[in-house]
Amino acid sequence: MPLSPVARSARRGASILTLLTAALASVAACGGSDGEVTSPGGSNPGGGGKAGTGTGGGSNTGGKAAAGGGTGASAGGCAFANCGGSGGSTGGGTSGGNGGKAGSSASGGASGKGGANTGGTSTGGAGGACVKTPGTPGPIQGKPRPAVDNECDATKLPPGWTGIPEGTSGNGFDDDGDGLVDEGCDCPGAGATKDCYSVPSTRVDPQTKLPVGICKQPGKVACTAGEFGKAWSGYCIGTVKPDAEVCTPGDRDCDGLEKNPAEGCECIPQDPLLCPTGPIYTTPFPDPKNVGQFSAQPNDPKSIDGIDGATWFDPKILDPKVAGNVTNWRWTVVGGPCDDILPHPTFALFPTKDTTGDFATTHLGTETNLLPQIPDKGQPDPTKPAGTRQGYVAQGGTTPAKLYPAFSLSGDYYVTGKFTYKDPLTKQDKEGQCTQLVKVRAPGLRVELCWPEVGWSGNAGSPQTDNDVDLHVARLQGNPSGNGKHGWFDAAGVAPNSDDCYYSPNSACGNRTKSGVNATPGWYSNEITNEPGNTGVCHGWGSRRFSTRPCASPRLDRDNLDCDPAIADPNAPEQDPGQVGENYHNFCGPENINLDGQVLKSGDRFAIGVQCYNCVQGSNGAANAKPARPRVNVYCDGELKYYFGYDPAALMSKPDQYPQLWTEGQRDYGSMWQVGVVNWKGDPKDPCAIEPSEAASKWNKDSWHQKSNGSQFICVNNGPRDNGGASFNPGTAPTNWLFKADGSYPTAASDMCAN
């Protein structure tokens, strides 16, 4: 019997009330909303509610009922992939609505219950609840061994240990899980470095024998040498440690499987973060109008414009371009070893790729020397303050989500972005952080020198001219000699006979005049490196080399004579136009000598030396005298392979582990640190090896050597052939700077260190 208008009105009001009630219940249970009654009468049930419109909604779209039935119309808000839909409201017939379908995932929620069979006024039941599925453990589950003081002590290996053998020099892994790598194991010499990882060697891919996931990014551990011998420091700087697994791409717990936390990901809204999992690459000395250009692989075209934090989010889950979704950007960037020693960083951050404006107003951030090791959360030395690295921090309301870094030195740089973003489910603010590793690479051999006393005098902040330390790189084969002998300075004669590349225009790198022609011939006929656009090899942002001077090998790009520590701009103009060198009254950068890739051949050998020209603060021998504390970094094809000397951020900063230059001498005498010998191998995977020059005598031979050498593993000669600093006739003094007493090339690095 047809209903009267009054009855129909009452029925409609009851249906609306029950629809609203069921809709609220369905959202709470993550189901689709109930079907809405669209026509009275009929005996067929209404269809199930539509799927939730949130990310991964259930698949319970209601079909249109037969004549007289209801149609599932409303949308639910379920954010999971496996929630059951709610049942449909009834039509005007005698049966309740069917239950909503189960969620679409393999472990989806149960179907919603149908409406009670009480006639046309009943509503469908609520959708099924989310069903959790525990995460599946990854295939790589190796555990550390018990902690030991010496990881190379084979007597302390636990039974059944399956890790990579340590031998006597370690394996580069934290096998005992104490945060240190190869502690107690022997190493080749002070300053040697090797790749290291923060996981035990049982937690590696069985094929590659390397970690997986975010842990595959290696750090570097250094060899330290002191009174009690040589051993790896244990501090793996730059490695990435395992983290808690989350439901985002990337294997964060390094077990060989991503998105597998113990609680599973079925009932967890997917996080929008997509942090970088690999490095990007660039070259030093970029075009000042086009900095911040990167590639995904070392030699690919630079197709990545800037470092854009917006690309760290999945726009299907959270669109970072929508106002308010991602805010409060804070950037931190730390660089290489010399950046921690020099007065100011050698890199900078900009909001645009064009850096030609005023540095003070265009660059981003403020300097600080209290930054932690990035991306490590810990410190390299627990006794150090909260931070020991120098770099830039950019933060504040106008800090952009995208920035353009400019780099002037090879090495590895860590760019960390912190931000606030909206949780897609709760709409509450969350804190996030990602780190992008930037590898700055240039082919060939680069040796750089820096020391903390550069540009300073006894009066803090006053630039002066009496702190000059000089870098030397000498070729140990193929050089003619006017007198049949080989050594530092002009021991073999002036160019083209000179073995040594140093500050003199008569040396092997005699290319320090303003004209484009070398003052003297060098070592190689193919010495000039092609440089398209006059940037990227020896000219560009951060370079001090005159634009008219070609990129020759070898070349001394910077000679720190009288730099000003008050200048923070790496591109500051020369403050004394009358000078003709590259580094007088301007930015204090590292002194460096370079040989580009095309001139190097397998088997080439080069000696490295550091000499105190005029570097002691105060008078020689006076109680208030302060020596120079040099640091030398050796880069092969852009990768830091060895670093020697003073290090403010690690154990090598102890006085018995770095050289001290106490005697000034110009060319005739003075402290000469015989650093070591580079052997060029030419292997793209391992291009060079470095042999430190160790002292032949005990480190406490006498008081001068005790404080100058640091240890028997460091060699500082007091004048030519360690003559005690006695003055020589200038006409004969250069012949005393021989590598060996008989004037021959050294066969081992220790040959250069006199007894």
Image: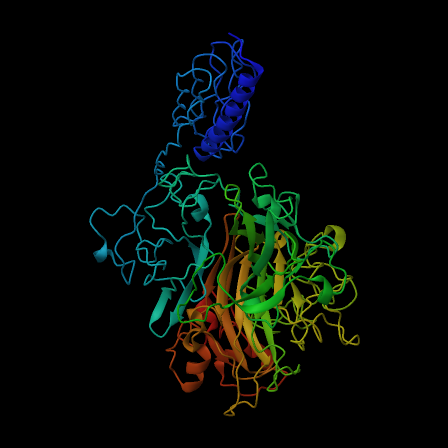
Q: Residue at x 32, y 55 (%)?
A: 177
Q: Judge left or right: residue 643 versus residue 728.
A: left
* Residue occupying image coordinates x 66% and y 81%: 463
Extreme residue toward the top, this view:
1
| Quadrant, the C terminus | bottom left
What x and y, as percent, mark residue 445? Answer: 58, 58
Residue at the (25%, 48%) spot, across then down: 161
The colour scheme used to paint the residues is rainbow
Position of 326 compared to 571: left or right? Answer: left
x and y percentages locating residue 66 in the rendered image: 52, 9
Q: Would you say residue 451 is visible in this rendering?
A: yes
Q: Quadrant of residue 735?
A: bottom right
- Looking at the image, which is closer to me, 442 or 555? 442
Report the number of discs.
Answer: 0
Work out whether residue 437 can be spotted.
Answer: no
Instruction: Quadrant for residue 518, please give it.
Output: bottom right
Please tell me which residue lies in front, 353 or 225: 353
State whether residue 617 is above or below residue 271.
below
Q: Position of residue 48 (x, y in %)?
A: 48, 20
**Image location (x, y in percent) of residue 680:** 52, 55
Q: Is residue 332 above or below residue 504?
A: above
Query: In the visual, does 194 lie left or right of 145?
Result: right
